[in-house]
């Protein structure tokens, strides 16, 4: 059973989808990511592009993020996300987008930017490189913002306009955190 680690919804138990279609981020991995980012959450805008249960965005909201967009193409996952957001009393600070990630990014282009983006698609989907490219092409990450990617590959990810902030292994998962480069004025 997953739970919210700390913040306004501390201890709330979260639902997940049954079966193998959704692989929740392990508790230890989530705790490590939020320890790294703990001082970069307050008042921030978050995008969780492959939401699953919504746990990453809901954890960020619980810890003080201002708002979150949570996306998932699976209607069953969207229902779980809604229930979890209501249970944690964070529903009013999130927007749920039940469509594929390419449509989400295209539709947000020019309308919104994010300080923190979570990319945790199914490991074998091949979606990560495309998602990173579209985030960059559409300018959806603010300067100094972070993109947190979970993979099973030991190779760190890269993206034009972003630098490697951290790459670590947690169990079978690898977390790559990229930081959007700041432009000099």
Image (cartoon, rainbow, N blue to C red):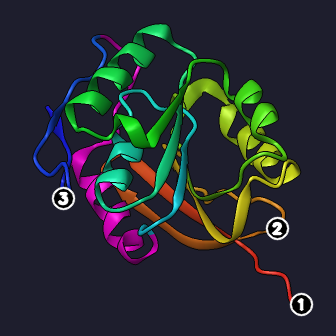
Q: Identify the image quadrant of residue 69.
A: top right
Query: Looking at the picture, does residue 160 appear above or below residue 94?
Result: below
Residue at the spot 33% in from the left edge and 19% down from the top edge: 80
Which quadrant, please, contains the C terminus? bottom right
| Circle 1: element type | loop
**Pointers 1 and 2 in contact (C-beta within 8 Å):** no
- Left or right of 160: which side holds 60? left
Residue with the mark numbered 3? 6
| Residue 21 appears anywhere in the view | no
| Circle 2: element type | loop
- Mark closer to the chain start, 1 or 3: 3
Q: Identify the image quadrant of residue 42.
A: bottom left
Residue 138, percent from left and from top: 85, 48
- Left or right of 83: which side holds 39? right
Query: Looking at the picture, does residue 183 appear above or below residue 38?
Result: below
**Pointers 1 and 3 in contact (C-beta within 8 Å):** no
Name the main secondary structure of what is drawn in magenta. helix
Residue 161, numbered label? 2
> Which of labels 1 and 2 is toward the front?
1
Which residues are drawn in magenta?
Answer: 19-40
| Circle 3: element type | loop
Q: Which class describes the residues within 10 Å of circle 1: few (<14), some (14-19), or many (20+)?
A: few
Residue with the mark numbered 1? 185
């Amino acid at each position: 059973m997953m739970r919210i680690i700390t913040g306004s919804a501390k201890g709330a138990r979260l639902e997940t989808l049954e079966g193998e279609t959704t692989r929740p981020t392990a508790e230890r991995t989530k705790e490590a990511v939020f320890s790294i980012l703990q001082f970069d959450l307050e008042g921030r805008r978050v995008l969780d592009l492959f939401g699953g249960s919504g746990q990453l965005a809901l954890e960020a909201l619980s810890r003080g993020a201002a708002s979150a967009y949570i996306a998932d193409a699976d209607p069953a996952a969207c229902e779980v996300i809604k229930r979890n957001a209501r249970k944690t009393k964070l529903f009013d600070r999130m927007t749920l987008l039940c469509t594929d990630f390419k449509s989400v990014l295209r539709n947000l282009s020019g309308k919104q930017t994010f300080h923190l983006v979570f990319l945790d698609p199914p490991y074998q989907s091949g979606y990560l490189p495309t998602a990173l490219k579209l985030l960059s092409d559409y300018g959806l990450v603010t300067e100094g913002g972070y993109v947190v990617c979970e993979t099973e590959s030991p190779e760190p990810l890269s993206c034009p306009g972003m630098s490697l902030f951290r790459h670590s292994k947690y169990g079978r998962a690898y977390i790559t955190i990229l930081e959007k480069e700041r432009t000099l004025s």
